Image: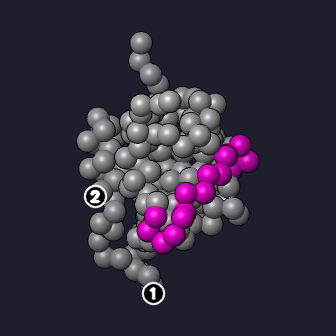
Amino acid sequence: MLKSRLLQPQILEALALAGHSSKILIADGNYPASTKLGPNAALVHLNLSPGLVSATQVLEALVTAIPIEAAEVMQPMRTGQYALHEDPPIFKEFGAILKAGGVDVPLKQVERFKFYDIAGDMDVALTIATGEQRIYGNLLLTIGVVKP
């Protein structure tokens, strides 16, 4: 029996196999997880229904389980049909959860197609498909080191 906040067996297995500089993608409900999956990534489906499980809920569990040295989000489109004139509110939530978990890293914004490339790279150890419905609810974490 585990006492930590993270209990999902496939996620625990993938994290145990990952190491420093491995990446974890928390993917929202719009993310093409099966077609943009990294060649070494385990794919865990937590998308039970719209909004469940959310990307922020997954992040809250992950910050208790791994050291995080970097966090990247998909840069919002600033022109066109789906343009946003300010950052999505979920970015502030990601930042607050990281900070509350003792992680002091900025959210680096990455252009959409470059984000897809990075999230499908061989360094991605785990992709977690969530039921997150808020736009730009994707977060790519880089695992840090456990200091002695």
The kind of secondary structure element at disc 1 is loop
**Main SS type for the magenta part?**
loop
* Residue 108 appears in the figure: no
Q: How is the image coloured?
A: one colour
| Above or below 143: residue 98 | below
Badge 2 amino acid = Lys
The span picked out in magenta is 38-52
Residue on which the image places disc 1: 81
In the rendered image of this protein, does residue 106 appear above or below residue 64?
below
Name which residue lies at 44% across and 68% down.
51
Residue 129 seen: yes
Name the residue: 37% across, 46% down: 60
Q: x%, y% of residue 87?
A: 32, 67
Viewer-nearest residue: 2 or 55: 2
Q: Which residue occupies 62% across, 35% down?
A: 13
State the residue in front, 21 or 100.
100
Determine crowd level at label 1: few under 14, some 14-19, many 20+ residues with C-alpha closer than 10 A: few
